Amino acid sequence: MKPKLSSALPLLSLPGILLLSLLTVVLGGLAPRASADEAQTWITLGADAFATLQEDADVTRGRHPLTNYGESSDVVMTRVPTRVLADISAKIHTAHRRCGGFMAHRTLQQAQEALDRAGAADRGAPIAYILDRQAQVQQLADQVQEAPILATMASLSNDFNNRYHAHPSGTSASEWIRNRWQSYALGRSDVIVELVSHPGATSQPSVVLTIPGTTLPDEVIVLGAHLDSIAGGTSNPDFLAPGADDDASGIAVLSEVIRVTLAGDFRPQRTVSFMGYAAEEVGLVGSQAIATAYRAAGTNVVAVLQFDLAAFNGSTEDFGLLTDRTNSTLTTFVTELIDTYQPTLLWTLTACGYGCSDHASWHAQGYPTAMPTEARFGEHNQAIHTTSDTVATLNNSAAHAAKFARLGVAFAVEIGIDGGGEIFANGFEEGSTNGWSSTTR
């Protein structure tokens, strides 16, 4: 069942507490002493990104060289001043063309757990992903429109100074998204829309809309995107950061999937949650908090789909499917959704490195994830994290993003429904129609 998102981590056993205390003493003794008023944050990041930061004393503001407190596979654990997280994000983006590139942790315990799981093998899927709802998918996906997607991208990138997590505009953006999603849910008393706060981590709340499952409510599907933005290589929250592609496009895709499915009176058997994550750009803060709470509550999340960068068509292929920190079985199913429902479109496999988006938070908790993105890594929009990440740079078009919205509809319907049974109150007719008509591509 859906957990209380503010829940804390599960209690440790006495041996666990003693072990953690010993680890804290040992690592604390090794760590450079910070001034009394200098907050510190544990982070895990790719070994390549760690090496980059080791070479740049300006970014870490006196914490140079950084200390490697542990390493697993290609991931390193270290500790940095909290106030430089945005600068680290900018440095990693400049050097590796990678969004974020690290995970920020509230405690040493959480950082150590993330490090321990960094090299974990791909787990099998908790359920069978079966493609068997073509009539329902087709009827809903045909309702996807470019205009509302573009309108959401324009509103988020134009109507707020930026969506930086520590800026009042970032909180206002969360509230705007909440209100927009609530407007789509009018008349559906079963649908819950809420702001999820992250005390002590960020003032920006995440936004969650949940459609409870009718017969399998304890099996949960998550579709997510991040709502914050960043630009300029600075932690100055007043700096312009429109973030039209990164990641207003992902929020716009989620919003269109919500609009279409609720307008079609979609009542899934499994619970389907749509999540706009806070503070992704400074360490996947919102998604980590939510995924950790779900794991602590024992929530059975059976599939997670992440949308991050959806509006720039930079490759020959229409979709780049990430292979790192994702589940191979679920990723294969996503390619089957593309081949079935958008057969003229192309996909390829690519990788983005450690902590590049919020799917990594769910993967770290052992949940199956998949992430389609706008292009091959390296061929994505080079205007992200700059003041030029605007809808104008995207030619004022949401044509590419609409492909992701259709994919999102297919994902929610095909996994949200288990086998047979009527799940639309308005009773869609069964049929064998496959693919898209030429007028909707």
Image (cartoon, helix red, strand yellow):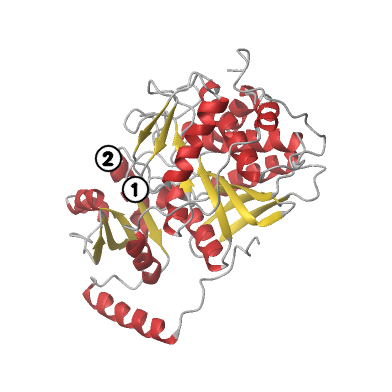
Q: Tell me where residue 100 appears, x and y as whole percent.
A: 37, 46
How packed is label 2: few (under 14 Cα within 10 Å), some, or many (20 or more)? some
Compared with 352, 277 (above or below) is: below
**Element marked by disc 1:** loop
**Mark 1: amino acid:** Gly
Residue underneath mark 2 = 96
How packed is label 1: few (under 14 Cα within 10 Å), some, or many (20 or more)? many
Q: Tell me where residue 162 appears, x and y as whole percent.
A: 50, 40
Q: Nearer the viewer, residue 75 or 171?
A: 75
Can you say which quadrant of the picture contains the N terminus?
A: bottom right
Distance in Å between CA atoms under marks 2 and 1: 9 Å
Q: Tell me where residue 284 appears, x and y as whole percent.
A: 44, 52
> Do callouts 2 and 1 mark residues in contact (Cβ within 8 Å)?
yes
Q: Tell me where residue 167 appears, x and y as whole percent.
A: 51, 49
Answer left or right for 364 relative to 196.
left
Q: Which mark is residue 339?
A: none
**Element marked by disc 2:** helix
Q: Residue at x 50, y 62 (%)?
A: 292
> Residue 108's quadrant in the figure?
bottom left
Q: Which mark is residue 101?
A: 1
Q: Residue at x 39, y 34 (%)?
A: 386
